[in-house]
Image: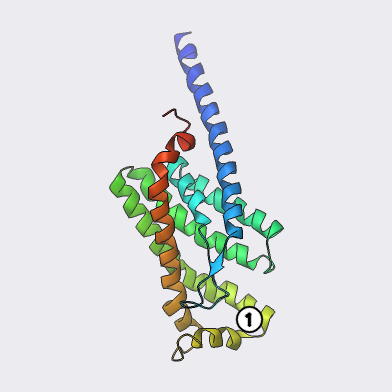
Amino acid sequence: MTNTKTAEPTTMARSTRRVRNMTVTAMLSAVAAVLMFFDFSLPMFIPSFVKMDISELPALLAAFSMGPVSGVVVCLVKNILAAIFHGSTGGIGEVCNFLLGAAFVGSAGVIYKYKKTRLGAVIAALVGSVVMAVISVPVNYFLSYPVYSAMFGGIDLIIDAYRALRPSVNGLLECLLIFNMPFTLVKGLIVSLITFLIYKPLSPVLHGRNR
């Protein structure tokens, strides 16, 4: 009887925590989907068809507060919502955004799960940003840009857009290494910095605790 009574609160607590995590994950997914609407171009640094946004911010908050799976789920749900309400590339943009976001928050979340310190969070965010930047090259080279070139008139038009910024670039791979990879790294670092600034104030909501 004693063991049963002891187990009941534990089971109830786990169930409550699971429901809370699902609720917070859904909320962060909705916020992430909204943030995707507020993308913008930086034509002085990269062709205007490459957009900057901070929609991975809620996903990184989820990964740090509830684990890497929650972060990846936020990336998945926000891209499904974006494809439904905001999609303009036949879904390929959302697929690539999911792959990059999942690489970012998934790797960061795994590291932070086993090293829950301030230093651990910094290392996790830096590693996640680097992973996303590196993954962006094969994802764009083998997936997104071949589809975009078929949809919008050929790969030469895409490369010409990069040559307008750097005439010496030679081929798509060089474009991705010189422009897209650093751009993606900076994006991850910006999202990480904002996360560090707002995580503590949001911690009671994310973790379900009173101040």
Residue sitting at x 48%, y 38%: 206
Q: Nearer the viewer, residue 109 or 157?
A: 157
Look at the picture and state if 58 lies above or below 208.
below
Farthest left residue?
A: 119
Pinpoint residue 81: horizontal percent, then vertical percent: 66, 54
- Please say which color scheme the image uses: rainbow
Task: Using the image, determine if residue 36 lies above or below residue 159.
Answer: above
Q: Quadrant of the C terminus?
A: top left
* Image position, residue 183 (x, y; %): 44, 70
Q: Secondary structure at mark 1?
A: helix
Q: How many marks?
A: 1
In percent of width and height, residue 1 lies at: 48, 8
- Which residue is at 50% across, 88% downward? 163
Task: In this rendered view, identify the residue nearer to me: 57 or 95.
Answer: 57
Relative to residue 147, is residue 164 drawn left or right?
Answer: left
Question: Residue 153: x percent and y percent?
Answer: 67, 85
Which residue is at 58% across, 37% downward? 23
Q: Quadrant of residue 80?
A: bottom right
Q: Residue furthest bottom?
A: 168
Residue drawn 42% across the image and 79% down it: 178
Mark 1: which amino acid? Ser
Dot 1 crowding, Cα within 10 Å, few <14, some 14–19, many 20+: some
Q: Identify the image quadrant of residue 113.
A: top left
Provide the residue designation for mark 1: 149
